[in-house]
Every structure is written in structure tokens, then in C-alpha cells.
Image (cartoon, grey):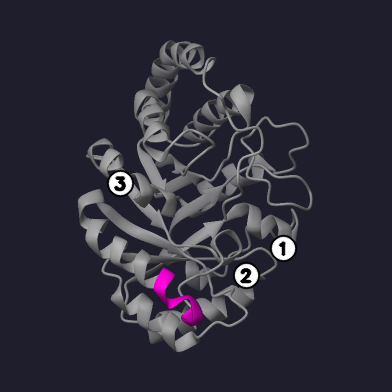
Amino acid sequence: MKVGQTIQSLGQLKPSHIISMANFLGFEHLELDPTSFDDIEAVLPLVKKKSVILHAPYYFDWGFDLSSIKQSEKVEKYMKNLETYGNALGAHGIVVHPPMDPDKDEEYYLKNLDRIKITVLLENLPGQKLEDFKTWYLDTKSKTKANVGMCFDVPHSFLTHGKDDLFNIPEILLPDLNYIHISELNADTDCHWPFGTEGGALPLDLFEKFLKRIKFKGTINMEMMPSGLEGIENLIDSYLILKKFGPKLPYILKKIRISLLKPLLMKKLKNVPLQAEPDKHN
């Protein structure tokens, strides 16, 4: 079971800086958001031999998504970056939300999915019931030429269903599920916190039981946006919490490595101006 982190610009820290820290600590997976293309020359040499997934633009972060026909120049720029650098990055998948643009064009959205040569991981939205996601997912999968899989966003499901039905994923979707987004949140906002943040409400015990129930062997991505030194420390601790849910030996080895390297990293970051309230990412 791989565990990794979303990579995006954080204040003065570029994606390449974040990747360097993740590599130093031994994270085995990286999810690159669109800001990584702005730092692509520095990013490319850092992602060799890593598990890499990309994240397509999300309407409420970027003002467009792959359905935004009225923003076709921005969409085309992203698609060209994907086509140009996807192989060089070693990306084996890309997370894509259902269309959220009020002016969405479904045909344009499907045409863009058809252009993607790597696995398209369709993600459930906050407020979208899993049964409704199932209907949309299966319909989209039947209409596109792309190789489709599922990205299950745990906080999105928590905000939609609460604790009791959080992990009630329709059985027909489980064979397509090998990628998960997770982060801490409060009771009503997708905060993208690391675990250990005050006010967190996510039931990690239920998440562990869910992983064991479905015998999950895929990748868990920490979609966590840390604030300051304490946030970064909590993010590192979050990585170990998730690794503990997997096989014992890899967890022990990672725990030893991080116990040795974490103090060095935190010391180095003391003089770095860190963003207090990072941008959200979904």
C-alpha cells in the first residue's frame, strides 16, 4: 500500500521544494496539481522512480474544468501540458472531478477525457451521494474511450453522508477503486488539514476497518495542506499513521527513517517563510 501527498505551491515553496521534502522523508507517491507544470523543469528530475498521479483543474479552485468550453484556451493549455509532460513525469493516472462549471458542456468534457492516454480517476464530490456518483460514474465510463477508475475522496463522503454511511460505496464500484484521497476536516468544511489538527472529526478507526474489509492494496494520497511548522509536522505524522494501516515491516522501516530525518527537516524549515493559510485543493 503506497502513501503519498498532494504537491502544489505553498506560499514561497514551489512544487519542486515540496517534492524534495517528500523524497527526503521517503514518501513513495506524489499527486501533482496544475501548479506543478509551472515548475516543470525542476519537477521532472525529482519524480523519477516515484508513483505519480496528476490532478486536473477543479472549477472552484481554477475557474475552469475539463467541461469549460467557454474557457477552452485554458483547458487546451492544460491538455497540452498533460500530453507533453505526462510520460516524462511517469504519470499513470489523473484525477478528474465531475463537471462543476455552470456553463459546462458534457460533449466537450467527454472529448477531453477521450484524449487522455493514462487512467482517468473519477472522483466523488462533496454533497454528491455515492449512489448518485455511481450512476454518473458508470454512465461516464460507458461514454468515454478513456481507461476509467475511481478516486474515493473520504472527506467528501463524510460531508455528504456523515459517519454512519461514510464508507458505503456501492459494491459495483469497488473493483475500480485503487486510489483514495484523505485528509482531516471539521464537521462541515473540507479543510484539508493534516491529522492531529485541533477540531478534526474524521473517524480514522472506521477508515482502517474499511481498508481491511475491502483488502485495499492501492494508493492513499494525503490531500493535506499544512499551515506553518506545526502543520508540516502533523503531515509527517499523518503519513506514519496511514502507513501503520498497511503491512508491518514497511511501516517499521519508514518509522525508523522518519524518526532520524524529521528533526533535520524541521530545523531546516525554521528559517523558511511558511504560508499560514494555504489555498484549498479538492
Residue 274 appears in view: yes
Q: Earlier in the sequence, mark 1 or mark 3?
A: 3
Three-letter amino acid code at disc 3? Ile
The residue labelled by disc 3 is: 40
Image quarter in which the C terminus is found = bottom right
Residue hosting label 2: 130
Real-space Cα distance between discs 1 and 3? 36 Å
Image coordinates of residue 67 in percent, x first then y, are 48, 78
Secondary structure of the residue carrying tag 1 is helix
Residue 142, position as x, y percentages in the image: 40, 85
Q: Where, by quadrant of the figure, is residue 253 drawn?
A: top left
Q: Is residue 235 magenta?
A: no
Q: Which residue is mark 1?
A: 160
- Judging depth in this view, the residue of 192 and 177 nearest the camera is 192
Disc nearer the start of the sequence (2/1): 2
Instruction: Give the mark nearer the N terminus: 3 vs 2.
Output: 3
Which quadrant of the view contains residue 15? Answer: top left
Q: Vertical placement of 160 versus 33: above or below?
A: below
Residue under the point 74% across and 52% down:
189
At x 57% / y 28%, what residue is drawn? 274
Contact, mark 3 vs mark 2 (Cβ under 8 Å) = no
Relative to 86, is 205 above or below? above
Mark 3 residue crowding within 10 angstroms, few (<14) / some (14–19) / many (20+): some
The percent coordinates of residue 197 (x first, y second) are 70, 32
Can see residue 27? no
- Give the CA distance from mark 3 to mark 2: 35 Å
Residue type pointed to by label 1: Thr
x, y percentage for residue 254? 40, 23
